[in-house]
Image (cartoon, rainbow, N blue to C red):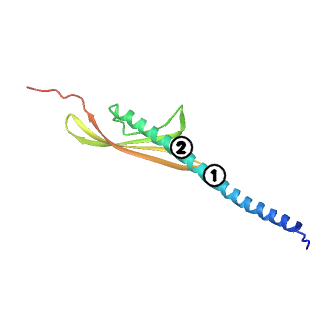
C-alpha cells in the first residue's frame, strides 16, 4: 500500500475556496450598494412628486393670479424647493385658462434633481354686471 502526503493540497484548496468566497461576497456587496443608491433616489423622487401634487392642488383650489412664486416646503421638507410660473391665460369675460408650471428641486447625494409638473386651470373671473 502506498502512502500519499495530502497535507499541502488541503491548504491550497482552502486558500482557493476563501478567494472564491471573497470574490462572491464583494460582488454581492456592490450590488447591495447600488440598490441602496437607487432606493434613496426613488424615495426622494416619490416625496418630490407628492409635494408637487399637493402644491398643484393648493394652486387649483385658489384663484391663483400670482405670476411667479418661489419657496420651500418647510417645516416638514425644507430640502425641497419649489418654483411656480403662471403664464397669462386666454379666456372670456367670465373665465380664463391659465398655464401653470411647477418645478420641485431637491438633491440626491449632492446631485441636483428636478421634477416638473405642468397643468392648465380654468379660473373664474369676478362676476360681470348684467344690464337689461
Task: Provide residue 62's location: percent of width, then percent of height.
Answer: 34, 31
**Cα separation between marks 1 and 2:** 16 Å
In the displayed structure, does residue 5 sit left or right of residue 68? right
Query: Above or below — where is 59 with respect to 85?
Result: above
- SS for callout 2: helix
Q: Quadrant of the N terminus?
A: bottom right
Task: Provide residue 75's location: percent of width, then percent of height.
Answer: 54, 31
Q: Residue at x 16, y 26 (%)?
A: 129
Task: Provide residue 120's location: percent of width, then percent of height.
Answer: 31, 42
Task: Provide residue 126's location: percent of width, then percent of height.
Answer: 24, 29
Give residue 97's mark: none
Categorize mark 1 by other alpha carbons within 10 Å: few (<14), some (14-19), many (20+): few
Q: Residue at x 54, y 36 (%)?
A: 78
Q: Report the label total.
A: 2
The residue carrying mark 1 is 32
Residue situated in front as seen by the camera: 102 or 17: 17
In the displayed structure, does residue 34 sit left or right of residue 90? right
Q: Quadrant of the C terminus?
A: top left
Categorize mark 2 by other alpha carbons within 10 Å: few (<14), some (14-19), many (20+): few
Callout 1–callout 2 Cβ contact below 8 Å: no
In the displayed structure, does residue 88 sit left or right of residue 128? right
Query: Above or below — where is 12 with respect to 84?
Result: below
The residue carrying mark 2 is 43
Residue situated in front as seen by the camera: 37 or 120: 37
Q: Residue at x 67, y 58 (%)?
A: 27
Query: Above or below — where is 12 with respect to 54?
Result: below
Query: Above or below — where is 64 with respect to 114?
Result: above
- SS for callout 1: helix
Of labels 1 and 2, earlier in sequence is: 1
Q: Residue at x 42, y 47 (%)?
A: 116
Based on the displayed image, in which of its 4 quarters is residue 55 positioned? top left
Amino acid at each position: 500500500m502506498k502512502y500519499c502526503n495530502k497535507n499541502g493540497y488541503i491548504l491550497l484548496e482552502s486558500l482557493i475556496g476563501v478567494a472564491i468566497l471573497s470574490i462572491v461576497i464583494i460582488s454581492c456587496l456592490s450590488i447591495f450598494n447600488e440598490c441602496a443608491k437607487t432606493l434613496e433616489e426613488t424615495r426622494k423622487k416619490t416625496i418630490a412628486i407628492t409635494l408637487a401634487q399637493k402644491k398643484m392642488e393648493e394652486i387649483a383650489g385658489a384663484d391663483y393670479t400670482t405670476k411667479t412664486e418661489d419657496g420651500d416646503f418647510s417645516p416638514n421638507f425644507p430640502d425641497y424647493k419649489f418654483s411656480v410660473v403662471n403664464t397669462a391665460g386666454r379666456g372670456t369675460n367670465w373665465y380664463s385658462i391659465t398655464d401653470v408650471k411647477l418645478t420641485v428641486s431637491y438633491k440626491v447625494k449632492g446631485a441636483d434633481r428636478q421634477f416638473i409638473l405642468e397643468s392648465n386651470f380654468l379660473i373664474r373671473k369676478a362676476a360681470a354686471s348684467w344690464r337689461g
